[in-house]
Amino acid sequence: RTAGSFAAVDLGASSGRVMVGRVGPGTLELTEVHRFPNRPVRLAEGLRWDILALYAGVLDGLRAAGQIDSVGIDSWAVDYGLLDADGALLGNPVHYRDSRTEGIAEKVWATVPADELYAATGLQYAPFNTLYQLVAARDTAQLAAAERLLLIPDLISYWMTGEAGTELTNASTTQLIDPRTRDWSYDTAARLGIDLGLFAPLRNPGDPAGQLLLHVLEETGLTGPVPVTAVGSHDTASAVAAVPATTDRFAYICTGTWSLAGLELDAPVLTEASRAANFTNELGLDGTVRYLRNIMGLWLLQECLRSWGNPDLTALLRDAAAVEPLQAVVDAGDAVFLAPGRMPERIADACRATGQPVPATPAETTRCILDSLALAHRRAIAEAQQLADRPVDVVHIVGGGAHNELLCQLTADACGLPVVAGPAEAAALGNVLVQARAHGLVGDRTAMRELLARTQPLRRYEPMGDAAAWRAAEARIAAP
Ligand code: ADP
Ligand code: LRH
């Protein structure tokens, strides 16, 4: 066997897609066969994922994919579905932007202080980490009835194969994994009364994860057996695997709904300085650590677009490019922007509170968002290098934001480093390559990256402009 076709199911917070990757000797081609919106639904009880609509989109995609050698599934992190003793789903999975985790961290820290939690799990503080979600759910009827907890990609995989597992890269976002042992943090779970028995056994990217069930083959028109292969099921793990780096001295920014900015390391950084800077140590392929910071990302723009009635993005970005730079910036790491709704107003409020001009038009607000993201990228990449003692020469931008030329150029300018942009569908490519590797068609991570660098269209941005202007902008939003 020298070639194969692999379906990558990639569920992002803003859209789901099924892509087919064809991998042959020295070749890698990715085709989008189906894309569908991911629209969360607000109910009286809170914000929920429409998981059956997503699963229906996945089946439509597999039908459009044609005969394939394997399927891999990745999605956004931290969220999960609960199954009852019969294996039936108990309600719609709760969205990580739901308000149920407000005030939960303080409760958790009263039992396990924040510094002990960081030492044990290496995870950033984010209110939506699965650990806080499970503590928030503690006295609910749903959790009481649950026999099994499956993270979103593992849930989709379970529906397709009938086999339950917990893929490690995504498990590392629960805050229940020890990044040194790459196993559960049994002590953390015990102290917080979290039942690790809810989780299915851990599996690694590349492990076999079952075969499509008969009714799934019928639904999709595929001829069995079709195996499912575990991939880096955290979308960011798959995206980092597909950074087309040609040197070890690189930083990456995965830009989609979030910007995830940082480094690939061999070991976690668990220092107090790292905790104070809120860097996370999530797990990647082959024993690597994704040392990064979460930045609000293009969510800020997505939410503004929604409130403006979804105007044309290309025209808006063209207008934003003509707006005077760095007039007003906000802290794009600030959790005040986490919840949905009223985004232009919340951005205006933040500018006002820091004594800056308030953006008045959609173009000005968009420029404020992109300047602010570039500034947050600059800070994250500078601090990651310092905290991990790992200097870099280049920044790779992957994910949907690689399409945004203004954002890529501003990021190069702010970081004072060249930016290599692309591939935009890095998560799907990382997903495909891990399957191809499990089927013996590509070599190690370096070989995967060489293949990407050779086959994928990339664009390079050289840093330009005035470094002092970025420093001054940073000072305007620095905490007093
Ligand atoms: P997620 O996986 O979180 O759903 P994506 O990686 O698909 O996110 O990125 C989506 C974002 O990418 C959009 O919100 C948009 O800002 C940006 N994007 C996608 N296509 C383009 C484009 N052609 N021009 C500019 N920005 C784009
Ligand atoms: C990006 C992402 C990110 C997580 C967030 C919940 O899609 O997986 O890495 O922090 O969603």
Image (cartoon, rainbow, N blue to C red):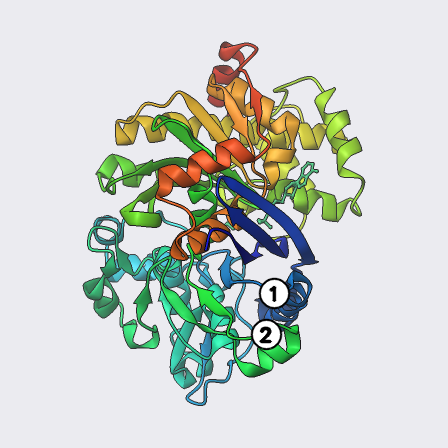
Question: Can residue 329 be seen from the camera position used here?
Answer: no
Q: Give the residue pinned by disc 2.
A: 223
- How many numbered badges does the structure rendering display? 2
Q: Name the image quarter holding the N terminus.
A: bottom left
Question: Can residue 77 be seen from the camera position used here?
Answer: yes
Q: Residue at x 37, y 55 (%)?
A: 169
Would you place residue 333 above or below residue 178 in this image? above
Q: Give the residue pinned by disc 1.
A: 67
Find residue 458 and report its horizontal and vertical position in percent. Answer: 57, 29
Find residue 422 and report its horizontal and vertical position in percent. Answer: 56, 34
Residue 361: which quarter of the image?
top right
Find residue 171 and report its horizontal and vertical position in percent. Answer: 36, 60
> How far is the residue under mark 1 from the one under mark 2?
7 Å
Whether the residues at callouts 1 and 2 have beta carbons within 8 Å, the answer is: yes
Q: Amino acid at mark 1?
A: Gln
Mark 1 or mark 2, earlier in chain: 1
Asked which secondary structure carries label 1, the reply is: loop
